Image (cartoon, rainbow, N blue to C red):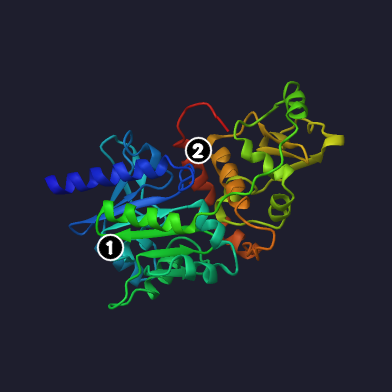
Amino acid sequence: MVMNEAEIAALLDLSARLGDNSLLVQASTGNTSIKLDGTLWIKASGKWLADARQQEILVPVPLSEVQAHMRRGNDFLPAYCGRSGVLLKSSIETAMHAVLPHRVVIHVHSISAIAWAVRSDGPAHLKERLAGLNWQWIPYVPSGLPLAREIEKRLLPSVCPSVFVLANHGLVISGDTCGASEALLRDVEDRLAIVPRRAPEPDCALLTAIATRSRWRVPTDRAMHALATDSICQRLHAGGVLFPCQAMFLESERTVFRSNARSAKAPRRSRRDDSLPFWIIDGSGVLISESISRTECAMLSALVQVLQRLDQSAPVRYLTRSEIENFMRSGSRRYRALAEANCPQTAVSA
């Protein structure tokens, strides 16, 4: 029991470190787990890894029950009442963590990994960058049981990959200890690293003038302005949705407000306008809504970071309409509500 407590403590420390790195985890994305004595301890749905040291974020799930449900073709996402009395539901990726034989599993939305994972030629580039590692590419499939099934197909008695790059999604790393898994993650991140493209400077005077007389404000994350000042980012962003969280938190059931510098007039205030998280003023910069959440800010920053790592000639594979619709039907509203509810109650600093 003492050993188990030490290993869970190690997982919580690892989780917090991952959650503090916005190039790996944004808001409530990502999940971690450890298998101990037939139990899978996995991050609860909607919880923020960054809160691992301050909040109860792990759900104990019997591995035998997950496996039994998988054999019947069902996802098993049990609810658990923790010591704090708060009801926690296991991550949608519970089945994926369960099928991997390694004791410790890390799933992150690595910016560098996603920048390769949204490319149709991603596998060819990764073959060189990940040479020497036991890795696999997973074509895009929805989270949950479909993803677990795809990973399970790659698990052989003689070959058990410890690195999975998920198309249009992220990265999965597994190992026998927290230390080994974290070291492997660092190695993979070093191999996948891409220097972000530098964007032209925004028109700060114009943005400030608009912000002083409207409900919009200038983001402190200057990288966001690339959506307005970098022609490559603009073209790629206009092409469609790159990863599920982009649709869930930024562009589902709403339209991004756009204008140019000559017609830089704030949209009239209305119930619909209040739902717009950001405003792109082409060639000048980006303004964010005064009502934008920390989660939305984190996702907007992540989107820009990915776009800045894609070159002009990159053959981008966007999510299809049916993939987006399937994702939005599969509990995305509930997950968004959980992520927002668990958001640290501090001021937005985007």
Which secondary structure lies at badge 2?
Answer: helix
Where is residue 174? Give x, y as percent.
33, 60
**Image quadrant in which you'd find residue 240:** bottom right
* Residue 340: mark in rendering: 2
Given the image, on which type of amino acid does mark 2 rest?
Answer: Glu
User: In the figure, 91 relative to 347: above or below?
Assistant: below
Q: Quadrant of the C terminus?
A: top right
- The x and y percentages for residue 330 are 52, 57
In the picture, measured across the screen, residue 192 lies left or right of residue 36, that is right
Please provide percent x and percent y for residue 118: 58, 61
Residue 241 placement, left or right of 340: right
Q: Give the number of the disc on residue 102.
A: 1
Name which residue lies at 39% across and 56% down.
187
Q: Amino acid at mark 1?
A: His
Q: In the rendered image, is residue 264 in sight?
A: yes
Tell which of 107 and 232 is nearer to you: 232
Give the Cα distance between marks 2 and 1: 31 Å
Q: Secondary structure at mark 1?
A: loop
Q: Position of residue 40 (x, y in %)?
A: 27, 56
Which quarter of the picture shows residue 271? top right
| Nearer to us in this view, 11 or 37 | 11
Q: 21 or 59, which lies in front?
A: 21
Question: Is residue 330 at all visible to an observer of this figure?
Answer: no
